[in-house]
Amino acid sequence: MAQDKAPEAKTRRPRAETPKGFRDYFGAEVTERKAMLDKIAEVYHRYGFDPLETSAVETVEALGKFLPDVDRPNEGVFAWQDEDADWLALRYDLTAPLARVAAQFRNDLPSPYRRYAMGPVWRNEKPGPGRFRQFYQCDADTVGAPSVAADAEICAMLSDALETVGIPRGDYIVRVNNRKVLNGVMEVAGVLDPADPDRFAAERGIVLRAIDKIDRLGETGVRALLGEGRKDESGDFTKGAGLAAEQAEVVMAFMAARRDTGAATVARLRELVGASVTGGEGVAELETIAELLDRQGYGSDRILIDPGVVRGLGYYTGPVFEAELTFEILDEKGRKRQFGSVSGGGRYDDLVKRFTGQSVPATGVSIGVDRLLAALRAKGRAGADTTGPVVVTVMDRDRMADYMGMVADLRNAGLRAEVYLGNPKNFGNQLKYADKRQSPVAVIQGGNEAEKGSVILKDLILGAQIAQNATLEEWKDRPAQVEVPRAELVAAVRKMLGK
């Protein structure tokens, strides 16, 4: 008796889903992003910066430990070990690759080296709402320039870039601060000893984190963290820096030092840093930046000296800057709120030191591409042409060569066009396809039109508008469909698109 065959295992199909923390970008999104980045690149190019494209993969050793709050060099990045036992990782920002390039090609690159870079970066972090593991960055940096004129130039360039992409003056502000000023304030407050930088390191870390939370916790919450500590609404207790009341007052005064003019703000900061040498250097740098920007026509309506800029002060070594969009939008609950920060940067003079052992001055800025693009969409200023192609429909599949000739004429005239390549049996499906492609015009030529040497142009945008809003009389006065000689196809399509 023959044995029954065992049933074959059912092949498991892969799930068609985007990996967690990642997303797909479709036509209009990609087009709008490219249009925005092209405009920013024009500004950077005008300032004399050169483009740089680095590999998406770096050695973990080259990336180093730059990510905040991690214990291992490869934590927070997507890393793997290759066949040579070297650890490689996807880049998590565009700055670490710049450090490697500046060190590797230091004998070939001009000094200072001015570059901009745009592209995706990857973070192996827990995703959340609006927080993805892959996103775009747009950076510009100057490596090898110790003068704060380089910082002032970055701020001016950032201002120009925002206005060029469609953020008008009055809808943004670039705020400037200086890490050295904060160090001077900490010295006065007694939590920084210039002779022993490691002393009070734990207290300084708590102070930095506390002032970085001023927007969320308010003055009372920050004061608590500067002192003994703070208990939140859930009852969890966060240990404070242990500063005495008079010490905490110095830090609080620093955050409230902004005045109506840059000169007045600088004067108040000079009072706060007292005899601190480091603090005095920082105040002088802010004064120079303000003067350089003023001579170029960048007033306080565009770029502002603001001690309230505290984000990133633990990382930067000198001037820091942040671009904030000041117009209001509605959040997911319909509440009004300001859009907030879309860009940040500053001076980080230890950029290349890890590779060469020598300190190399550097300053730069990074624009959050997705956030800036979201802001432009919120204001209706994305500005990219997302119109689909002209669609040449197929009435007779045996005459495909004729349709290909039409689309070739349109393309050679610089018009975006395509032939419908699906099943032409159902003409209604062809028009549905054109609608889904956001096509402005459909070209139609059946047997009768071919005999007459003509084509029919269907204005799909006007047709949709008429169908929704127009009366019968308006339909007659504004026909959404016209017949023209085949020889006039390109000119007629141009005319219809122009409307």
Image (spheres, rainbow, N blue to C red):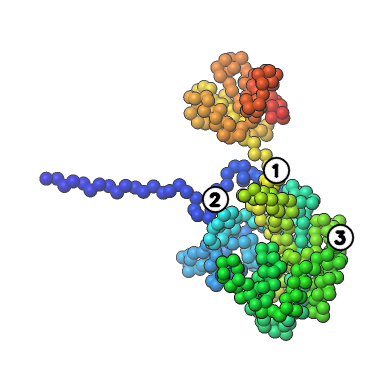
- Residue beneath disc 2: 23
The x and y percentages for residue 432 are 55, 30
Give the amino acid at mark 1: Gly
Distance Cα–Cα, label 3 vs label 2: 43 Å
- Residue beneath disc 1: 380
In the rendered image, the residue lying farthest to the bottom is 195
The x and y percentages for residue 175 are 76, 61
Quadrant in the picture for residue 420: top right
Labels 1 and 2 touching (C-beta < 8 A): no
- Residue beneath disc 3: 294
Mark 3 or mark 1: whose residue is earlier in sequence: 3
Q: Is residue 39 above or below residue 88?
A: above
User: What residue do we see at 74% from left, 71% from top?
Assistant: 252
Give the amino acid at mark 3: Asp
Classify residue 472 as left or right of residue 76. right
From the viewer's perspective, is the residue at label 1 or at label 2 nearer?
Answer: 1
Mark 1 or mark 2: whose residue is earlier in sequence: 2
Q: Secondary structure at mark 3?
A: helix
Labels 3 and 2 touching (C-beta < 8 A): no
Mark 3 or mark 2: whose residue is earlier in sequence: 2
User: What residue do we see at 84% from left, 69% from top?
Assistant: 266
From the viewer's perspective, is the residue at label 3 or at label 1 nearer?
Answer: 1
Category of crowding for the residue at label 1, using alpha-carbon neighbours closer than 10 angstroms: few (below 14), some (14–19), many (at least 20): few
Give the amino acid at mark 2: Arg
The x and y percentages for residue 240 are 64, 76
Category of crowding for the residue at label 2, using alpha-carbon neighbours closer than 10 angstroms: few (below 14), some (14–19), many (at least 20): few
Q: Is residue 29 above or below residue 275?
A: above
Q: Secondary structure at mark 1?
A: loop
Q: Nearer the viewer, residue 46 or 209?
A: 209
The x and y percentages for residue 103 are 66, 68
